[in-house]
Amino acid sequence: STPDSYGWWRLDLGSAPSSSPASPPGTGECDFSSEGPLWFCDAAPAHRSAGSRAVGSLFLEWRANQEAALGVTLCANDNQKTCGAEGSIRHWGYAGALPLTRNGEVAGPSGGFGWHVRLNKGAPRRLVLRRVQQFRSSTLLLSIAYPVGVGLSVVARAAPWCQVSSGTSCSHAFTRVDSVDAVRASLGNKFHVDASGILYIRVVQPPKGRTGNPEWQLLEEPNIPLKRDGISIPTLSWHDYLEITSDCTASGSDTDFCAGAVSSTTPEPCANPGWTLVAYDRCCWDSDPDVCVGPGETLPSVSISSSPPPRPPPPTPP
């Protein structure tokens, strides 16, 4: 690994993982401590609502019996049971990526533009998200590429003992929408697939033992969280999960994956000319760093010049 975990925990791209600090963007939002050395950045910067910056966690499962093998044949405290990377996950727009192993537990900053998953062997035919810990106030989008044109199904499923009744639903099929913004603004039961085959979902924590009453629900605290001294940690639901399946043809070399190539691009939150990603949740205008937008916000109307204005001619000599 690297001193800053490949940039995974760096909220502001100017922050320093070493002893020689750089000035992060957003004056007044970060303080440097030489004891770490670390930058401490506000959980709720001036441009974001309270609670928007938080930490989310989930378990990604892309192979059959993946979790059952942990500690037995893979990822154990034994040199003979290795835990090599099979993919990566990164913040949208970031160059660095955190390695993904069969121990698919991932925790990281939520409330940014999104996390992008890439598996070395391509698109998984079945991807399951388990043990989600995620506050409603801190939106988390997840993206992953599939072969263009394949069919996708996204279904939330409750624990096996859930029983359907007039007041309880045990599964919920997500509906497809036309944009990433619509996914971000949803209650977590929508998905989008763009022209390059990238799937986008909003990761939310399900209520315990059901998917709704019977309608879909997105609760701020699905389970009673652990709270102490102003810190709150969501309590996960062990047996509820989200299942993403594809009707793709299985790869001849590994049937857990789809045949066919997938896009190698990562969603770029600051793709408009003249805008730069300065934090995992902020794009700023190059000509005026105080003009910034966050996830789901519309770029303001600004005039972008391709070159600086010409200098005035020198004075005429006497």
Image: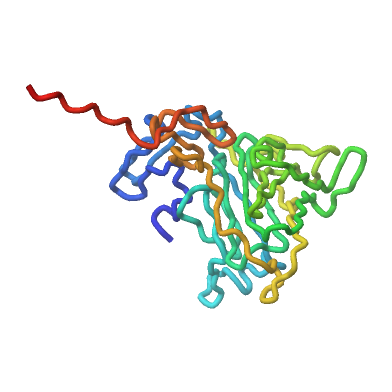
Which colour style is shown?
rainbow
- Tell me if 76 is positioned left or right of 222 in this view: left
Number of marks: 0
Across and down, in percent, residue 127 comes to 70, 59
Farthest residue toward the left?
318
Q: Quadrant of the N terminus?
A: bottom left
Residue 264 pos. (x, y %): 56, 59
Q: Which of the 4 image quadrants contains residue 233?
A: top right
Q: Is residue 213 left or right of residue 36?
A: right
Using the image, determine if residue 49 lies above or below residue 66: above
| Picture layout, residue 90 above or below residue 63 | above
At 79% across and 39% down in the image, what residue appears?
216
Q: Nearer the viewer, residue 260 or 91?
A: 260
Nearer to the camera, 83 or 283:
283
Which residue sits furthest top?
318
Q: Quadrant of residue 245?
A: bottom right
Residue at left 67%, top 76%? 253
Q: Position of residue 223 (x, y in %)?
A: 71, 40
The residue shown at (62%, 61%) is: 262
**Above or below: residue 40 compared with residue 158:** above
Which quadrant would the C terminus be assigned to in this image? top left
